[in-house]
Image (tube, helix red, strand yellow):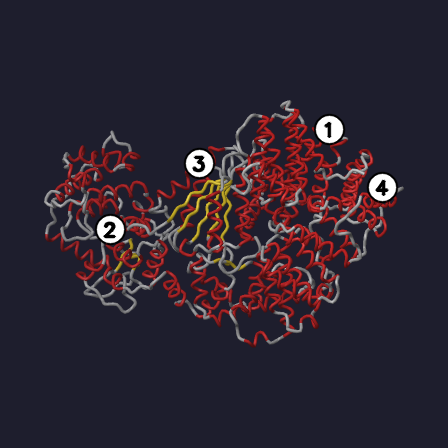
Amino acid sequence: NFAVEIGADYDIEDLKKSPELLFAALESVTDVKIPDSLRRNYAVKDVQTLPEILQKLGLVLYQLFSRGKIAPSSIEKEESIVYTNKLRTREGFDDGTEDEDQPGAKNGRQQRSIGDTCKSFRRVQISVLEDSLSELCVPASISILVKDLIERGDDDEYAFQSLEDVSAELRQIAVQPNAFLYYGEDTSQKGVLDFEGNIVGRAEEMSCLLEAAARIEMAGDDPSHPHSLVLIGGGAGLGKSYLVENVCDSLTESGWIYLSCKFDRLMAKPLSTIASAFEKFFQHVASSVNWGRDIGAILSSVQDNLSASGIVVLSELIPSFCTLYPVLFASIVRDDDFDSSEEDRISSEDEHLNDSTMDNDIIASAETLKNRLHYLFRKLVHAIARPEHPLFLCVDDLQWVDESGIQLLSSLLTDSDYLINNNGDSQRLLVFGTYRDDEVDEGHILSNYLNKFNSSASVSVRNIHLVAITKTDANVLVSEAIRLPVRQTRVLTDAVYAKTLGNPLYLQLFMKSLVDEKLLSYSLVEKRWIWNIEAVRATSIDDNVAELLTRKLRRLPDDCQKALKIASCFGLQVEESSLRILLASNKRLIPCLERARQEGILERDGLRFAHDMIQQAAYDMMSPEERGERHYTIGFQLVAHISSTKESHHFHPITFAAADQINIAKSLTATEGFWRDQLMHIKFATLNLKAGERSMEVSDFPSALNYLQYGISFLPETRWDTNYGLSLRLYESACLACYINGRSDKMTGFLKEILENASSFEDKLNGLFVLVQCLTSAGKLKESIGKIFFILDELGESFPESGVTPAAIQDALMSAKSSLDGYSKEDLISAPRLNNKRMHWALKLMAYALPYIFMLKPSHLALLACRIVNISTKYGVASESAFGLSSYAYCHISILHDIDEGYRWGKIAVSLLESFGAKKLVPKLKILCYHLNFFWVEPLQSTSIALLQCHREALMVGDNEYASFGAHFYCAQNILCGSSLPIVEKECTALALKMIQLKQIPSCLTHLTNHQSVLTLIGSNKNPFDVLEGFIDNEDELLHHSLSTGRLPLAETIDFNRFFVAFFFKRYEEAAKYAGKHMSRQVSLKL
């Protein structure tokens, strides 16, 4: 080891870090004083002294490596002739003949003499010095270094220019011996450019990423520590993904769990991109033969955190769960309330198309599906991440992110579950996101979310912007690729850098093109890469990477180009299911794809392009017309395959791929002949309906709306006459998708189409119910209730708009009591199920209206509750019957003052709903009962804990509205249970922030008045209304707001809380004043 021989006072690791130490070591060995001017400026102007320094250094190194021998001082003339002839023999030249190894030898370029060779490329000249070291088995790289130090020529552009050159070359040889010390002895990879070495020119960025990971590790399980997001922007080909991959290698070695995914500009299944990151991880787990302790702990944690129903729901996006939890899937076919079986949903294709059987549960809780899925993914992250194995997610190409994908990523980063994770075992998430910032403007969907991330307290954001690498770094990249020291590649790098401007991908592709054109090649004679520098400088280059890639692809055989064009129509990767269908109909694709793998165009495993720029280049080789034809042909093949299967009326795994191909073909206005077949139009419309409905089932409503709009576009003008069932289903689903996506403008058009063309009032109900929910979400509660009363009137269930008298309420309660007379809990649970469609709609609308009636028309509450009871006892019970029964129980307590009877019917209501297996609705009903009914009998300590559990269950099923109500009611009861008020205040603060995140403003307003009471009791001046950011500044403004908007229960709560605080502090006159106000505003009507 020459570094050790230089001097015992200098360790090799120190020499690697500092050239100054190396210079000091060289001074001690050579007895040459290096002037300070040389230390300040390595490119020495005084060339009269530099050659002497370098030569003396070379002589010393020669003596070191030759074991004490003195270097030859001169070369005799006869010896020179011998070695010149030897040079000719080794390089294969004879009076100007060509050498096949040399650049330009086979493509018609000029023949070269020995003199030409010296000028056109760098060759290793055989000399006495080299030969003498070679005889001593000194590696060629050391021999060349020593020879070039001793025999430095002033006109040699490859000569050492400074001591820094010497230092850099010695460092390369010492640090990377396999590449630079023994390279000539290894012939296994000769002729292949190696760009897989260490990342170059990104040390600062690497450090930033590792620091973000270190912060997560130091945070441990601290729930107050934010998630971490590092955004890496830059143009195409700057090495964003490669940077992240290098950091990932480092982190996985230290125990991190690595998940990765990549968005595609052309194809994307609903939510599949981010879900695929988890699927790859669990695929790896499932393929592990021996499950270690860590994997077993992760699987147990997943089951404990998600529950059986949660695992079943996620199995739609993470199929590996079926393999990992076979016992669970053997006992649970499906979450009965969340999904029905395919046989129940679509018994036959004809029935599916001709009957409007839109699942009312999906309509009533479409938004909860998305909430539930987001919550389950957050729980999944919590289950996987552990202090000893932190979790990081790499999301590539965010410039192509879809709305559902960015919503899920936002939920993972910004949504917190404080009341669930306040036991101190919360784990933080680290996310690396890459995107092309030149493709993201202010109107891009990503921009809005980037602003949200930057302003969120739940996530720490760091932005990194990549630019082109410097020429020095580019030289290192070239040096490591061809295994020659940076001094010897400097001239080549100058030429390459001038063409590529420091874009790493462009540089690599350009050098590979030089190899293809024989301007850069590996010489078996010299055992190194050689090049024709003048030809490299004269080479014309394309304006961008895409053109360079296109030129590379066009050099392939026509069949291979065609195969790549077909593959590019699927985006970055062709899924295995689609690939099998394509190969079955065209066997010639197989050798073409294998050729593409050999060329490095496709990855070795599967059918995935090595880089998205390559896929884009293959796709751009086609004109828009050719793209349309290819997409249509592929889509037609996939549709034909679906139709040929035995279960074609069920959802086929390639439905999304088939629909995407057909829809892209239509958007490209392919040849009109493709679109004349009306029967195929109906097939395409049906295909998009299935894709849209399945998208809604997995909560990807943006994709659903896209599929449904394409489905509608395939319908004929006579659709309502010739394809009524299919048309109604498409328009109903499109209405729902518009509502969830907040596209009320488009929803109005779809709804108008339904109302004008529906053949019966029942066929209008799905669309009308979506309208009711849209009005409610917009805060137009009075309009929403008015529309509900209008629909109920059309269904034959009329209610007075106003003027409800105590006598009318008394009559309704007595009528319901008479209907229930003689019914036990067992009798109601075993009662016949409601199968009257009109009555079921009436129950659904009344049950939906109950909480809003409680706020705005409290006098109508008893009327609606008793009507639900009467319909249920007459026509049969449904899940909505339980909500009417619980409201009836509340009326027993608040109006009839019969606590025992009210408590009994409340319990029966919960049991009735549970008998339907309505897991999504049970938390909602329990929250209402524990808040309004059960606390009259059960201790508050018990009901408050039950409310916290109901809050968790509501989050699990995606009911954010009632999850917020449950947490609010929990805090309210917790105040009265003797709990530590500072702890209660901390929970109140976290909960308020959570409600704002979930956009649950109504429950947040009620919660803030309770929070204000807690702050007053502990003597704090903190203003809880700051979370509203100026919407309402204090409790007085909140009281005014509640009275002006008709929210009497909120005003009642404010009066009660003020009464409670005044009474606690023994301000009895003030307490009496608020008690009087409270009594005057009570919602309960006394008879």
Q: How many marks?
A: 4
Q: CA distance from mark 3 to mark 2?
A: 39 Å
Q: CA distance from mark 3 to mark 4?
A: 59 Å
Please give the name of the residue rendered at 61% of the width and 25% of the height, measured from the top-left corner. 980
Q: Which mark's residue is nearer the viewer, 4 or 2? A: 4
Question: Disc 4 or 2, which lies upstream in sequence?
Answer: 2
Q: Residues within 10 Å of mark 4 (few under 14, many from 20)?
A: few
Instruction: Name the element at disc 3.
Output: helix
Q: Amino acid at mark 2?
A: Gln
Q: Secondary structure at mark 1?
A: loop
Q: What's the distance in space between the residues labelled 4 and 1, CA to CA?
A: 26 Å
Q: Is 618 in front, or is 310?
A: 310
First in sequence, mark 3 or 1: give its number.
3
Identify which residue, 390 or 82, lies in the foreground. 390
Q: CA distance from mark 4 to mark 2?
A: 91 Å
Amino acid bearing label 3: Ala
Whole-percent x, y for residue 824 in the image = 86, 40
Q: Residue furthest right?
A: 822
Across and down, in percent, residue 874 comes to 86, 51
- Rounded to the nearest angstrom, the CA distance separating label 1 from label 2 is 84 Å
Q: Earlier in the sequence, mark 3 or mark 2?
A: 3
Query: Looking at the picture, how far across and down is residue 365, in whole percent?
Result: 67, 50
Name the residue tied to disc 3: 214
Tell me the quarter of the picture where residue 1016 sits: top right
Residue drawn at (59%, 32%), measured in percent from left and top? Answer: 1012
Q: Earlier in the sequence, mark 4 or mark 1?
A: 4
Give the CA separation, mark 3 to mark 1: 47 Å
- Residue 48 sits above or below residue 354 on the image: above
Residue at numbered disc 1:
939
Q: Is residue 610 left or right of residue 1027?
A: left
Q: Which residue is mark 4?
A: 826
The residue to which callout 2 is attached is 488
